[in-house]
Image (cartoon, rainbow, N blue to C red):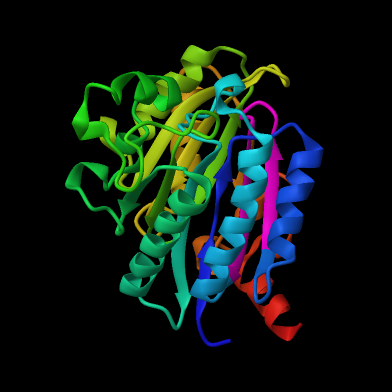
Amino acid sequence: MDKWVECIPNISEGRDNAVLAAIRAAIETTPEVYLLDDSADADHHRSVFTFAGPPAAITAAVLRLAKVVVESIDIRRHQGIHPRMGALDVVPLVPLEGVTIDECVDEAGRLGERLWDEYRIPVYFYGAAARRDDCRRLENVRRGQFEGLRAALPDDETRRPDIGGPLLHEMAGATAVGVRPFLIAFNVNLATPDLKVAQGVARRVRESSGGLPAVKALGLALAARGITQVSMNLVDFERTPPRVAFEAVRREAASLGVDVMESEIIGLVPRKALGPTDARDLMIRSFDAAMILENRLDAVKKG
């Protein structure tokens, strides 16, 4: 294959192993698609699958996993700490090799149409695929989450989906399909159960509050572990790499008398985003070479 697109669907299920196994199987049985990574978090009640392949095969894989999601997940009963507006919450497409942003935008449009035609899931487009300026940022699309969006739609035409609707799917909510550059999902766990500490640190480091450029951050409670987390999206790791984000979180936490326990990468990370000692210095949880995007791609190309 000479065209590679990465797809990283975020699904509002992080606890039911049978559902997660069915989603994994849907991806792995799609011709020309290679599952690179998957992870699930019970506190977030969310899973993230990373796979790659040519554009049309990526769409086929998303449609297969969407069938599992629609049949298995009721967003009305979902309770987790991560923001969400649908069962198949977010489907980003990232051009890797031999594919342009514009080609990915075209494929995102085809995928959105089929999600509506085949499963009646209304779709919003974000990132480079956005059809409205106010939808370029995912947080604007997902504002109010499932419950707030469901309440707003009957009267607020500005919140209507780009495809389908005008109301949400009763059980699956809505899906945001986007095209974007590579993003690093990077979390730093704090040795405190005090949510206000994590929220305060997140506020200080995120770009929208005057913090680090190209960083989005939330403070979250990991109740099962009795700790908190600064959950970050590094949307341009060349402007703010993981080391800079980690050090900022550690510095802000220390100013509040709190230590950093560890960090974690959700999904994969480009090789050039990490320095030679970052895995150790950043205390990246369970780090190994398979978390490097290029290593996983090389492995699947070799067969």
With respect to residue 186, does 220 lie above or below? above
| Residue ID at (37%, 33%) | 142
On the question of residue 70 being in view, the answer is yes
Q: Is residue 278 left or right of residue 199?
A: right
Q: 75 or 223, which is in the foreground?
A: 75
Query: Residue 213: x and y, percent?
Result: 30, 46
Q: Is residue 293 magenta?
A: no
Of 233 and 210, nearer the camera is 233
Position in image of residue 34 (x %, y %): 68, 69
In the figure, is residue 206 to the left or right of 223?
A: left
At 46% from the left and 43% from the top, the residue drawn is 121
Residue pictured at 45% horizontal, 60% vertical: 111
Q: Eyeballing the image, is 90 above or below 146?
A: below
Q: Position of residue 168 (x, y in %)?
A: 41, 32
| Residue 50 among magenta residues | yes
Foreground residue, 297 or 47? 47
Residue 281 in sight here: no
**Which quadrant would residue 160 be assigned to in this image?**
top left
Q: Give the prevailing secondary structure in the magenta stretch.
A: strand
Residue numbers of the magenta segment: 36-52
270 horizontally vs 277: left or right: left
- If the image is split into quadrants, where does the N terminus sit? bottom right
Q: Residue at x 69, y 16 (%)?
A: 226
